[in-house]
Image: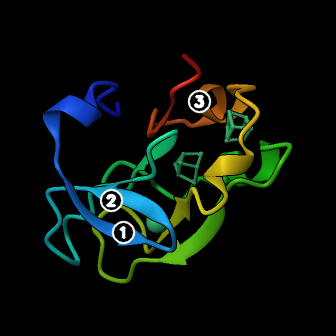
Amino acid sequence: AIDPQFHENREKVDDHDGHDVWGPVDEPDKLGIHGTHVAVDFDLCIADGACLEDCPVDVFEWVDTPGHPESEEKADPANEAQCIDCMLCVDVCPVDAIDVDAG
Ligand code: SF4
Ligand code: F3S
Ligand code: ZN
């Protein structure tokens, strides 16, 4: 599961379309965590797609990640500022790749 303390345990290494990327990143095998309020551990995501289907405000968009061992696309929290903290995505992800900081 995604580390809910990733803010403390990881370092911001990049910016992707306006959201933070938390390392370590070593493409294409290691992609880190994308987002801060809505955070997706790209190294855990298996492209199940439940988060894209269920999010009521369309926070997620597919991003291609060719060569990653778990899946060749990931749910990117492209619109994390739209999040209404419903926690549906956290509940439906089969690999617990998503953390939403509703505090
Ligand atoms: Fe979307 Fe709800 Fe997840 Fe926020 S908590 S990203 S609104 S499904
Ligand atoms: Fe990935 Fe979980 Fe969404 S596996 S596509 S973050 S439901
Ligand atoms: Zn991203």
Q: Which amino acid type corresponds to the residue marked 3 in the rendered image?
A: Val
Please give the name of the residue rendered at 56% of the width and 59% of the height, measured from the top-left corner.
Answer: 75
Q: Disc number at residue 90? A: 3
Q: Residues within 10 Å of mark 3 (few under 14, many from 20)?
A: many
Which numbered tag is attached to residue 15?
Answer: 1
Say if mark 1 contacts mark 2, CB within 8 Å: yes
**Residue occupying the point 66% across, 49% down:** 81
Give the structural element (helix, strand or loop) at label 2.
strand
| Structure colour scheme | rainbow
Nearer the N terminus, badge 2 or badge 3?
2
Q: Classify residue 1 as left or right of residue 62.
A: left
Report the disc number at residue 29: none
The span from disc 3 to disc 1 (Cα, nearest Å) is 23 Å
Q: Image check: 81 left or right of 33?
A: right
Which label's residue is closer to the chain start, 1 or 2?
Answer: 1
Instruction: Find residue 93 and report its horizontal and vertical position in percent.
Output: 57, 37
In the image, the residue with mark 3 has its CB under 8 Å from the nearest atom of ligand 1: yes
Q: Are marks 3 and 1 in contact (CB under 8 Å)?
A: no
Q: Determine whether the beta carbon of the residue marked 2 sits less than 8 angstroms from the nearest atom of ligand 3.
A: yes
- x and y, in percent, of residue 46 in the image: 46, 55
Quarter of the displayed picture in which ligand 1 can be seen: top right
